Image: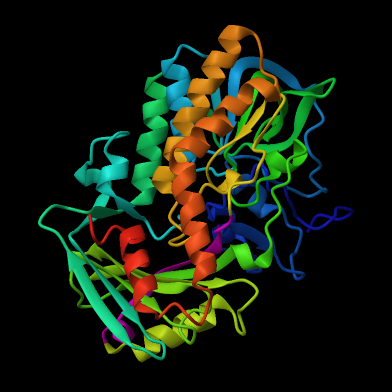
Amino acid sequence: MLWGYAMISIDESKCCYCGGCVSLCPADALYLAETRLHVREDCLDCGDCIVACPTGALSLTPAPVARQQPCRRSYDVVVVGSGPAGATAARFAAERGLSVLLVDRRQEIGSPVQCAEGVGHEMLAPFIEPDARWISATIRRARIVALGHSRADMTLGTENAIGYVLERRVFDRVLAERAVAAGTEVMVKTQATGLLWEDSTVRGVQLVTPTGQCEVEAKIVIGADGVGALIGRWGGLDTRLPARDLMTCAQYLLAGIDIDPECTCYYIGEQVAPGGYAWIFPKGERRANVGLGVQADLAKVTPLEYLNRFIADQRTLAQGYPVSLIVGGVPVALTPGQIVSDGLMLVGDAARQVDPLTGGGITSGMSAGRIAAEVASEAIAAGNTSAAFLRRYEARWAETLGRKMVRNYRLRERFPPGKRDDSRFLQVFAMAVGGTK
């Protein structure tokens, strides 16, 4: 035993949670939980695990953030977050000749998945040609079931494919590869920890990488960091969400179930998912994403408990086995009045560019990413990255998909929870999920 040292310490900015250290531990003091490595109190401090770590994340002394002199790099645009919105923004900015850096806190782009993975063909096609590599199922029908006072069950369909259930782990990676092909540089397992400022203008980002700190200068920073929207907060933008405009969600990937492989199903009812709905999205080979979203201020139990109840009440689903579980939050708010500041723009979930009726945000985020890239290119060409110039992005969003989002938010307000088994709401919801296209 080694004496005089602290317990094994983990530098999470370096840890890749590969599990090699767990296999060497003689006291079973190390274990993985989700994407985190933990050390139990009965650790022997023997140090055996250190030799197994491929990134140097383990030590016998507390692991401070690296203190070496920060590196300095410079780009036209830095995009924080490599989801569909961020990767699309990076791609279109690079295609316009800008130098672009795309950073993501995850070690693997596309994982873990935090999405039901459904998307419409019409909105997706302008960005990327559908490819069997990242399509789990082609959807031709949508079934909507209301479980309230006036029970209703409608199935809508079309001869043409109305949508797909994606394999987001592959899809997101392909989008990032498209951005790289256009000239974007990518850094993974890289956490943004703050912004760089020049007077009152954003001029870059502070990063922590597996090898240390890094300050990256940029003429424009695009925040695509999801529902948390830390980039926006640091930039002085109000991205707070009231509880009524946040859906808390839980989803299993269920295997071994017999369902229609070309039909998505939606269940609306306050007993099933207060303020939201449950879904079944087929993924082929007798698998499906089965989940639900609950309005945050209406939940009486956790979303996972609602989900377990829903599955237990559906005989077909109850026969299946969960092979993965994801949880998360989805904004169903209006896009804030200000999603730009001097040198900064927000896209995707960070800008609340999500359909308030369905919670779908993949293609709307991609649309926003393209618009942001166009305006970034214009701003840099003009030598003007002020908020006044960047508001062109806000205006173009408002004139296009923003109108649909405002309309759907008003419809959501018109049919509050408890009144969504109304036939008029079901028709509206059917249009929103694409069942009538």
Q: Which quadrant would the N terminus be assigned to in this image?
A: bottom right
Residue at the spot 30% in from the left edge and 80% down from the top edge: 320
- Residue at (35%, 43%) from the top-left corner? 171
Residue 326 horizontal side relative to residue 260, left or right:
right
Query: Does residue 344 appear left or right of residue 363 in this picture?
Result: right
Relative depth, front residue between 120 and 65 = 120
The answer to whether residue 285 shows anywhere in this view is no
- Residue 91 located left or right of residue 409: left
Q: Residue at x 13, y 52 (%)?
A: 160
Q: Nearer the viewer, residue 79 or 159?
A: 159
- Quadrant of res 284: bottom left
Magenta stretch contains residue 323: yes
How far across and down, in percent of the image, does residue 217 sit?
A: 69, 19
The stretch of residues the image draws in magenta is 316-333
Q: Is residue 124 magenta?
A: no
Name the outermost residue toward the right. 4
Q: How many marks?
A: 0
The majority secondary structure of the magenta stretch comes to strand
